Image: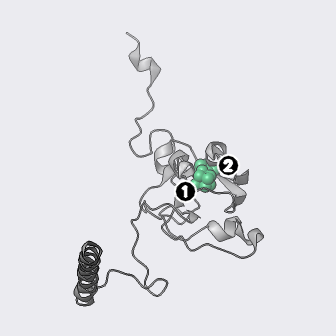
Amino acid sequence: MEPRRNFLAAAWEGLGELVRGFATTFIHLFRRPITEAYPEYHRPLPERSRARIILTRDPDGDERCVACYLCSGVCPVSCISMQSSQREDGRRFASWFRINFARCIYCGLCEEACPTLAIQLTPHFETCQYDILTLVAEKEDLLVDHGGKNRDYNFYRHAGVTAVGGKGEHLQEAKPVNRRSNLP
Ligand code: SF4
Ligand code: SF4
């Protein structure tokens, strides 16, 4: 008699679990789905997401990058390279600029180091390729026609270099001190 009672108890318990499982499925039939149909739907990512890198321009439309090499120096995987050059008015620029996205780990250190806010990471993450060589981006692939996250910033108007104005004419820059005026 004892084995038969154990079997009935186990069968009753199994049936209860079965009903509970179906009930859970049934309840979820009437709930709003939380799945997202990617790639038809792209969930908007925060502006500070770190993915595809761009080179931005200042509000005057000039290239922000002054080819200072800080980003390539700080990059932990050495995937940035460039060659600096100089315009006739003294403004520096990169004659070529290259990022190997096959090595980039999207750490954002280049953006942190950049004094001109030229190099910026964007939320655009769909950069997969079948051919690894196509992941090497040249300057023309990186340069955009806007200022990215900081559209109003113009490095040269703050920097105090004479390419944009004389000493004391830049934003938040004090006029040069006349040393003779300090004499007693
Ligand atoms: S995000 Fe990091 S790894 Fe990628 S280029 Fe910038 S510093 Fe290098
Ligand atoms: S992107 Fe910024 S840090 Fe890199 S070379 Fe240009 S100005 Fe310097």
- Is 31 placed above or below 147 here? below
**Above-or-below relation of 19 to 61:** below
User: Could you tell me which secondary element the residue under label 1 belongs to?
Assistant: loop
- Residue ranking furthest to the top: 184
Q: Position of residue 42 (x, y in %)?
A: 44, 80
Query: In the picture provided, is 33 more to the left or to the right than 91?
Result: left
Residue drawn at (26%, 90%) of the image: 29
Asked whether, in this view, residue 38 is left or right of residue 104, the answer is: left
The quarter in which the C terminus is drawn is top left
Give 169 or 140, whichever is nearer the viewer.
Answer: 140
Type of amino acid under label 2 = Val
Q: CA distance from mark 2 to mark 1?
A: 20 Å
Q: Nearer the viewer, residue 20 or 118?
A: 20
Question: Helix or strand or loop: what does disc 2 sit on?
Answer: loop
Q: Earlier in the sequence, mark 2 or mark 1?
A: 2
Q: State which mark lies toward you, 2 or 1.
A: 2
Residue at left 50%, top 69%?
146
In the image, taking residue 106 as reference, residue 175 lies left or right, namely left
Residue 77: assigned label: 2
Image position of 123 (left or right of 46): right
Q: Residue at x 47, y 55 (%)?
A: 154
Coordinates of residue 8 in the picture (x, y in percent): 25, 80
Q: What residue lies at 24% left-to-right and 85% top-to-bottom? A: 19
